[in-house]
Image (cartoon, helix red, strand yellow):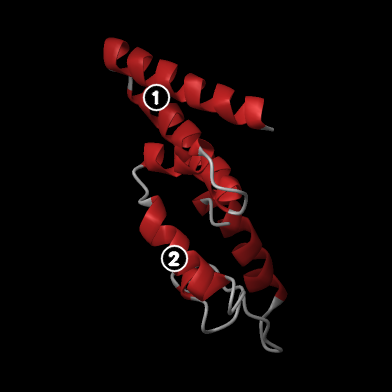
Amino acid sequence: MKVMADLLVVLMHLMVVLTALTSSYLLAAVTGLVAGMNLGVGHNFQHQKNNFRRYYMELATFPTTDWRLIHILSHHMFTNTYNDSETQGVYPMVDFNAHRDKGVCYRRLSQAMVHVRGVQ
């Protein structure tokens, strides 16, 4: 996994240079998707022993030090509940909480929006 994470960072840097050289909006959008993937990789390394890969989130302009503290105090203490600020931040579009009156359409729409918005 570490090699794949490092290759993803190299790919993102190459794509940034190509985007700057070509001024392509399509390539810029794809580069943004790869930056989002680095965000996910950095999130996974936040849960492991401290190493440089946890800072891959910074490549997507995401502050790792503040996020780590908030993530642990909110998400890990109150995982997917009303007190979890990470899940409540996307509440109107995605509802992680279980309800009896939550219809099948809304349940499926919430699951789809997780993938569209990149919510973890």
Query: Label 2: which residue?
Result: 69
Q: Give the class, few, some or many, for how many residues have Cα within 10 Å of label 2's Cα (few <14, many ≥20).
A: few
Q: Which of disc 2 and disc 1 is earlier in sequence? A: 1
Q: Is residue 81 above or below residue 67?
A: below
Q: Which x, y percent locates residue 19?
A: 34, 18
Q: Is residue 90 above or below residue 27?
A: below
Query: In this rendering, would 54 be left or right of 79?
Result: left
**Identity, as a three-letter code, of the amino acid under mark 2:** Leu
Q: Nearer the viewer, residue 108 or 63?
A: 63
Q: Which x, y percent locates residue 96?
A: 61, 73
Query: Label 1: which residue?
Result: 26
Q: Give the number of the disc on residue 109.
A: none
Q: Is residue 116 above or below residue 78?
A: above
Q: Nearer the viewer, residue 106 or 88?
A: 88
Q: Give the class, few, some or many, for how many residues have Cα within 10 Å of label 1's Cα (few <14, many ≥20).
A: few
Q: Quadrant of residue 113?
A: bottom right
Quadrant of the rendering where the N terminus is positioned: top right
Q: Which x, y percent locates residue 83?
A: 51, 83
Q: Residue at x 34, y 15 (%)?
A: 17
- Residue extending furthest front? 50
Q: CA distance from mark 1 to mark 2?
A: 35 Å
Q: Residue at x 28, y 16 (%)?
A: 20
Secondary element type, mark 1? helix
Indicate which label's residue lies in the foreground, 1 or 2: 2
Secondary element type, mark 2? helix
Q: Residue at x 58, y 78 (%)?
A: 77
Query: In this rendering, would 14 be left or right of 111?
Result: left
**Identity, as a three-letter code, of the amino acid under mark 1:** Leu
